[in-house]
Amino acid sequence: MSSPLSALFGRSPIRPIQEHMAKAQHCVVLLGDFLEAGFKKDWLQAEQLQQQISACENEADELKYTVRTHLPKSLLLPVARADLLSLLNTQDKLANRTKDIAGLMLGRKMEVPESLIDSMRVYYQQSLNASVQALKSINELDELLETGFRGKEVEFVETLIEELNELEHQNDLTQVGIRASLFKLEPELPPVNVMFLYKVIDLIGDVADISQMIGGRLSLLMAR
Amino acid sequence: MVDIISQYGSVFLGMAILFGFFMAWGVGANDVANAMGTSVGAKAITIKQAIFIAMIFEFAGAYLAGGEVTSTIRSGIIDIQKAGFADSPELLVYGMLSSLLAAGLWLLIASNFGWPVSTTHSIIGAIVGFAVVGISADSVVWSQVWSIVASWVVSPMVSGIIAFCLFRSVQRLVLDTDNPFVNAKKYVPFYMFLVGFVIAMVTLVKGLSHVGLDFSFHECVIIAVGFGILVALIGLFMLRSIRELPEDNLNFHYTSVEKVFGVLMIFTACSMAFAHGSNDVANAIGPLAAVNGIVQSGGVFSPRSALPTWILLLGGIGIVVGLATWGHKVIVTIGRNITELTPSRGFAAELAAASTVVVASATGIPVSTTHTLVGAVLGVGVARGIGALNLGVVGKIFLSWIITLPIGAALSIVIFFLFRAVFG
């Protein structure tokens, strides 16, 4: 029986958005394994991991489409529909970026200079930490819903976002250091390789940037 | 002609009892699920508990508080003088029988196709229908009809506002605080008191004279407060074993808090069943009471006559039987569709809806419990309490009015003329 009460409750987008973020962040985790394979020049394993990242990104895409198709304009939501959708898009960029990095490095069988590997590890780790912090913030969405996006819970999430901003800032500083080190190595390396190396450094920094943007979107969501 | 009454009186009464029981069965089979669905969906009570609660409290609501609305339907909608009933009282009998049959038939048809139908709207449409066409437009007490129709719009809005305020108070007092669990255990008993107090107060003030109890307003307040305290004490007893365990709150920090509200929702489930019984039983037994009144008095109708107890009992039993034989399945279906509703929201919606409906029952206004509950849920949604609500439902509700009222009227008119043809 299609009672008005049955028809009244729509599919809440909150859980699916949290699931999507978990999926996107998982891509970032896989990227770490991929980079390690690349550092060891184990291109077979790197290719396997790139496939996994690609599959993970596809799953994230499917989750994204599911959320979008179940958000008609006639739904009464606790937050603005546009805010939710742009949060979702930003989360999705995270997965896309990791796929870009893996694809680029695998395609060129990109070798990272020995002297840079340790700093790259630290650099990636910082991006990973930023994504973990972003995931932690997004996981507070159902608690935010519980409190009606008001009060103590909002304050708690704001502190998480501040920590996230700090992590991104640290990541920026590390990026400056790596670029400087690479600059010194330029004479010894093939120029085209160097350009793509700079590109990859940018992209890994993007992971932290996008994580920060996710925090920013969440902040906007709570403010309105 | 008084002769028709004396000739066929027992036949009419027998039919009225049959159709009335059928309608009551229909209310139990289709409508109770709407009242209990939110509690089951919020996982505050199991299906078995829902059925148990509904059986007791629907019956209690029907018997203790169903009298006013029944009176309205029995004699408040049709003006006896203007309808010329003194001369031909059998017309009222035909009309009430037709209304019952029409509403019952429409309920059956709509349920078969899975369309939602309000029993209240069906019976009101049917009664107004036969009166306007079968007798005359003058015979209807239009002021009463318009106030009933107005209440159909007002009751969801009022319950929405009450639900909004209740939920905001929960946010302020419990959810937004530094220690939600401690505050939950502290304040939930007050909400429990509120449930007991409102239900008792409205029921007492309206009068339990048919049960042999009659209190002054002062006495009502004292008794209602006492009842509220009793409910709160029972609630406190049920709450004492709920502890905040860290492993419960790993995935979701508010799991233990919601458990506390879950106990509160048991009480609001009872109040919903009570409110629903008090308002909807009249849909079945109002017309029956009218027929009974005429047949027993041999064609002389006195709207002031008391409502016989057995009629209220019949209505209550009919609802319970409908629930036991069919309604429990519908509760499962509705409960399954209501996913993201947690007790802290559910109780606010239920308490708001139950209070609104019970006040309507006390003032003798038949309202749709389902629509009132929808309004309450929307009120919580506006307070940003629920993940996603389909606003399209509001349009669907308006649509159902436009369909149910005319169809109820049309069916009733046809059957009315059939009766006239058969019995003269």
Image (tube, rainbow, N blue to C red):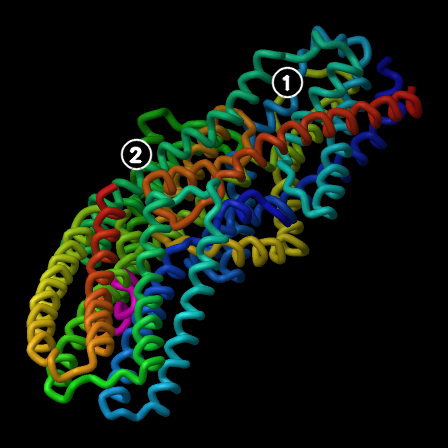
As for residue B254 lying within the magenta part, the answer is yes
Dominant secondary structure of the residues highlighted in magenta in the image: loop
Q: Position of residue B58 (x, y in %)?
A: 54, 45
- For marks 2 and 1 on the same chain, the one whose residue lies earlier in the sequence: 1
Q: Tell me whether the residue at label 2 lies in contact with that at label 1, contact meaning CB atoms closer than 8 angstroms.
A: no
- Three-letter amino acid code at the position of disc 2: Ile
Q: Name above or below for residue A166 compared with residue A115.
A: above
Q: Which residue is mark 1?
A: B77
Residue at screen point 24% across, 76% down: A192
Q: Which chain is indicated by disc 1?
A: B
As for residue B313 lying within the magenta part, the answer is no
Residue at screen point 56% across, 43% down: A4
Q: Position of residue B145 (x, y in %)?
A: 60, 17
Q: Position of residue B346 (x, y in %)?
A: 40, 49
Query: Dot 1 lies on which element?
Result: loop
Q: Position of residue A79 (x, y in %)?
A: 33, 45
Residue B397 lies in quadrant: top right
Q: Which residues are magenta?
A: B247-255
Quarter the N terminus of chain B occupies? top right
Residue at screen point 35% across, 76% down: A103
Q: Which residue is mark 2?
A: B222
Q: Residues within 10 Å of mark 1 (few under 14, many from 20)?
A: many
Q: Name above or below for residue B196 compared with residue B422.
A: below
| Residue B37 vs residue B79, the one in the foreground | B37
| Residue B274 vs residue A109, the one in the foreground | A109
Q: Residues within 10 Å of mark 2 (few under 14, many from 20)?
A: few
| Residue B145 vs residue A95, the one in the foreground | A95
